[in-house]
Image (cartoon, helix red, strand yellow):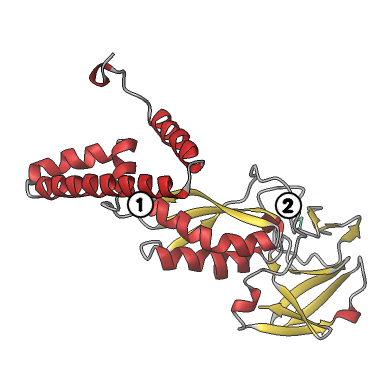
Amino acid sequence: MTEAESPPQSFEQMLKNIEALEAIIENWDEDQQRTVVALKTAIAALNKEAFARLIRNVKCEPTAMSALKQALADEVVYSVLRHHKLLKPSLHERIEEALATVRPALASHGGNVELVEVQLPSTAVVRLIGACSHCPASELTLSEGVEKAIKEHCPEIVEVRRVMGLSNCSGSEIPINFVSPFAGLDDSNWTYALRLSELQSGAIKALELNGYSLILTLLNDKVVCYQNSCAHLGMPIDMGNFENGIITCPYHGFKFAIDSGECLTAPEVQLESLAVRFKDGAVEIKL
Ligand code: FES
């Protein structure tokens, strides 16, 4: 069968063929590899120039532009033109690039982030996963890390929304750290709350701080802090029963896991957490 008669291959099959050839070349000696790279570069430059001329010609003909846009919906056409940098990266790609810049910091705390969807024209929906999903400092991680990175890479995005829910991310070997990895980047609004020694392990401490009504508790080696406000109807929760890591609102019995603020009665709500940090035995809260 001649090349012209061969059945068309899928995009995946074509990529696999290229990968298989690259694997063979990897075992060649350096001189041979250099020759192959030079050949690849020369052919790629020729292809790029041909595609660029084609696009320039199509752009001169307004009626052909819609055909070009249609052609770009084809994954092979899109991928090859993107490979040659003849197309700007899509909004999805730029958001993924932004997320890639914050992932090392999130990973250092046992977490991650994923793009759920882009709601055109200006909203990105993300999900914090791993340790970040239930970390009390997650709002800071979202605003100071994820949101800033997305808005820097994609000025057209004006809102970054977070959805809760399960992800497929498995547990991490990295110890969970309940201080946001971005806590140190923004030094504003950190307020001294109390000495660490004033907190008793496993007990709830209520505190009024600059007009905020808060609850804090010491859990092993971490301190968590929430608004003293039940996620059901906003009643104070500090006088609720606290047992086995679960605080029960004294008003209508909503239960919350104190380490994450997660509501065990109605999973779509949670206690509102505030970021906590320590300085020389002092506990500071970001208000
Ligand atoms: S206000 Fe807490 S359960 Fe209703």
Q: Which residue is located at x 70 percent, y 59 percent?
A: 233
Dividing the picture into quadrants, the one containing residue 32 is: top left
Q: Which residue is located at x 65 percent, y 63 percent?
A: 138
Confirm whether residue 261 shows in the render: yes
Where residue 46 sits: x, y (%)? Answer: 21, 47
Instruction: Using a 10 Å C-alpha cutoff, classify the residue at mark 2 as few (fewer than 14 neighbours), some (14 to 19) or many (20 or more).
Output: some
Where residue 64 sits: x, y (%)? Answer: 11, 41
SS state under label 2: loop
Where residue 282 sits: x, y (%)? Answer: 81, 84
Where residue 275 sits: x, y (%)? Answer: 69, 72
The three-letter code of the residue at mark 1 reads Ser
- Say which residue label 1 marks: 90
In three-dimensional space, the C-alpha distance between marks 1 and 2, rounded to whole angstroms, equals 31 Å
Confirm whether residue 270 shows in the render: no
- Say which residue label 2 marks: 172
Q: Which residue is located at x 53 percent, y 53 percent?
A: 126
Looking at the rendering, the quadrant in which ligand 1 lies is bottom right
Q: Does the numbered disc 1 mark a residue whose Cβ is under 8 Å from ligand 1?
A: no
Q: Nearer the viewer, residue 121 or 65?
A: 65
The answer to whether the residue labelled 1 contacts the one labelled 2, judged by CB atoms less than 8 Å apart, is: no
Q: Nearer the viewer, residue 272 or 275?
A: 275
Name the mark on residue 59: none
Q: Is residue 126 left or right of residue 44?
A: right
Q: Does the numbered disc 2 mark a residue whose Cβ is under 8 Å from ligand 1?
A: no
Q: Nearer the viewer, residue 230 or 175?
A: 175
The three-letter code of the residue at mark 2 reads Ser
